[in-house]
Amino acid sequence: MKLFGSTFLRKKNKNRGKSTEEELFQQQDITKYYSRQVDENKKHLGELFKGTFDFKCESIKIGGLKGYITYISTMINKNELSNRVLQAATNRQTDQSFRDMVEMRELYFPSIDYKVSKNFHQVVWSVLNGEVVIMVDGYMEALTLDIGLPQQRAISEPSTQTIIRGPKEGFVEALPVNIQLVRKRLKNPRLRFEVFQIGSDSKTNVALGYINDIVNEDLLCEVRERINKVDVGALLDSGNVEEFIADKSFTPFPLVYNTERPDSVCGHLLEGKMAIIVDGSPFVLTVPTLFVDFFQASEDYYQPFIMASFVRMVRYSSFMIALLLPSLYVAISTFHHELMPTQLLISIQAQREGVPFPAVIEIMIMELSFEVLREAGVRMPRVVGQTVSIVGALVIGQAAVEAGLVSNVLVIVVAFTAIASFVSPIYNFSIATRLLRFVVIFSASFMGLYGVLLFLIMMVIHLVSLRSFGIPYLAPVAPFRPKDQDDVFIRMPIWKNKKRPSYLYPKTPVRIKDQYKPGPPKPMGDQR
Amino acid sequence: MKNILVEKLSLWQLFILIFIFEIGSAAVVSTGNDAKQDAWIALGVAMIFGLGIGLFFHFLLSRAPGKNLFEIFQLCLGKWMGGALIIMYILYFIYIASRVLRDFCELITSFIFEQTPVEFVAITMVVVIIYMLYLGIEVMGRTSEIFIPYFFSFIIIIGIAVFISGEMEFTNLLPILGEGIKPVVKAVFPQLLTFPFGELIAFTLIIPYTSEFKKSKKIILLAVFASGLILIYNAILQIATLGVQMRARSNFPLLSSAREISLLEFIERVDLIVVFIVMYGIIIKVGVFFYGALKGLELLSKRPYRMHVVPLGAIITFLSVKISDNFAEHIEEGLIVVPMFLHIPFQFILPLLILPILLWKTKKSKEGRE
Amino acid sequence: MIILVTFMFCLIFCASIGVITVFDLYLYNQPLLTIVKANVSFQRGTSQWMIYSVLLVGFCYSIGVDYRVRKNKKTSKSS
């Protein structure tokens, strides 16, 4: 990667696909050109793939000529190979001759996707991609047949973003399937997918999807440029892309949205955003991302809008609770007793009587042990997961209180905080809350409520300074745009939502033109 | 991408900044005590003058479009004379910023944390302000956009809550103009004219960078008017709750009146809300003065102002503590020295002296163009 | 000038100390020296060490900025 990195970055995205192939060609010292003699080609391929058990280069007779059929056996569908390729090539009664590879394909494999490779490195590239290459003696080209990949994981319900009402399909690891999931929802000829090959070792396909007559041209160029700049050995998940294309790394807040739900990707595309689909990852990124995106679940749009607006309010407040509740407890119980009503103060202090620690230590113990439990719960093998949760609940909930380590109120505080932090529809976002919570507790522990306020102002300053692909992170709120408020704190009814968000500068700002409002049919009298 | 990325202060943000800037410390520190129960009338009169002041500053800037006050100085007086004047202004801004910061530190240390040293509060506040200014003036504008709903509603809510708690005595406001117009005039000039409204001078370094300069005139007037209304509301609230004597004696009358709130036997101490209002107001106020000083340094040293943020912040912290040994001295200096020796010359006399030179220069350049 | 930020820092610092000294002179009829001393000196037993350390941080920062600017200029000239 380092060898070609610099020349690589300067290249414009148009030549992108070509340049990776050339690079592969140079890197692995494939100095040979595709030769008219197939035996020579076979020899070079054999040298290149020496010691690989699954590399197959078998001789066949096709049209009376000598030829080789080359593939990696683990990368292809064997049934397809024997049924559609081998049988077609050998069962032919009359050996017809052909002028070139295109004609040969018309004669023998009319039903299979094909490509004609003129260079040796193209052949290598195709073989690595799980395609079948047929080389015939005496021709300057090789025929590449795409017979499809072996079986993939079936489409199933997303595991991270579950909903009650709405489509239950989730993305899978295969890029074509994911694109299909988006395409079948948006039947628009202007929905485009550009493919990039990223990673010097992995050569992962990354698709950038957008709707051409909605998305802003400048934004699109910016995203393309950033994807081109991704410079990594192997791209194993969309998370790797995320870190490269984000505007800023030193922030706890996620600057790129990821989702497992095709419907939410479609919604974002229709707003004028772009989707980045990485082969091998069921998490699709959408950019530019705003703070408010993390409070909008796709179910909001399938439930009645009043309910959805209420739920959205609950999400915003639970974000604040998850962030501030423990620190408020620390601040008030340490510094500002007078802020609490006397009755409440007495009951809290009575409970804390036997506790040997100051409130900060108390809450830190509980929060940290909760973090440990949560991490263990995620990483544990599913079989033992249950044990952890039972032991954890017992230890945290009851034993700690009975042993006099922590007070009862504190358990309520920590438990409620933990639950509130799960409300955000995107898991990434709750990570930010989790981290920042410790910072606030710390600052509250020696500056009281003044510290909490100080932290809040700092956090807002930080949030406001963030940008995602040049779009301010808190966009419809700061800078304030009155016209975009219909989908932020409350969700207006769908029939009222006629404009795309203007902070994304879409090419066509209007979704639907006609002013329709649902209502009962007009009484017969009116028509007369 | 360029046109999206380069973002200037929008008019709405300018409005908010002026609004918070004016209310900032004026709402908390007792103002217009000379007018006694007519302090709110004095504020109203001062507000009308404030509109005039805003117009004057805008007129000054509109003579040389795209230039801020300091660049106008250099245009009018040449490099060296202008430079000297700019240094004086920088000192003025730093001094006022430190004063305002000290006001807040005293509030925190005398009401919330009796044990905490002033220095500590000053440092933490300056850290926040440095962070904000380091990220730019637009960040300040956008942060204010986030906080303005809370800022505004808290001020209004305090009044309503005090009223519902039954602590207000509207007879405290009587007699209206009982001693004639003299005390009002005395309160307006020079104190009220200079303290919340004349300080708009710091905005002459921000207004040229707003997105639409032409429309900013209306915005300035609106903002001054709105903040004047809030200040009058506040004065009425304080006088009605505390009475003239108590208000004059109390250092932070808004806090004292907020302590009278008692609702449902549950909401009793809402100090935190007042502290939030003051804190944010102070951050903006110090930030704006700080920014003015930074702009001057940027012009003089021809280095981006971000380089000066941390050193200047350190000086402001130092000064805010050293400005006076105790709160009594601080208040005395603020009442006697600052209006006469700092506010009036820097807010009115110097700009007025500059104006004829500027008019002459711009006229000449216009003729030359024609 | 190469050390512009540090120079500005020192200039503004001295000038602002001058300003508060003048005001103190006006308010209290004390000799100049005592006032300057009170304004600059470090009072033991208080927590004033905090602001002095902040001042030190500001000074070091400005030196650091100047150093960086100088280095950048050199590299840009050589290239």
Image: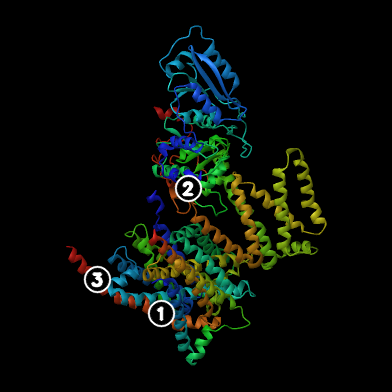
Q: CA distance from mark 1 to mark 2?
A: 45 Å
In the rendered image, residue A363, in percent from the top left (x then y), is placed at: 71, 59
Mark 3, chain letter? B
Tags 3 and 2 on a common chain: no
Mark 1 residue element: helix
Q: Quadrant of the rendered structure where residue B355 is?
A: bottom left
Apparent side of residue B109 relative to residue A29 in the rendered image (left or right): right
Q: Which residue is mark 2?
A: A485
In the rendered image, residue B248, in percent from the top left (x then y), is placed at: 52, 79
Mark 1, chain letter? B
Mark 2 residue element: loop
Q: Is residue B41 above or below residue A463?
A: below
In the rendered image, residue A75, in percent from the top left (x then y), is placed at: 58, 27
In the rendered image, residue A106, in percent from the top left (x then y), is placed at: 45, 15
Q: Which residue is mark 1?
A: B342
Q: Amino acid at mark 2?
A: Gln
Mark 2, chain letter? A
Apparent side of residue A73 relative to residue A396 in the rendered image (left or right): left
Apparent side of residue C22 relative to residue A329 in the rendered image (left or right): left
A77 or B187: nearer the viewer: A77
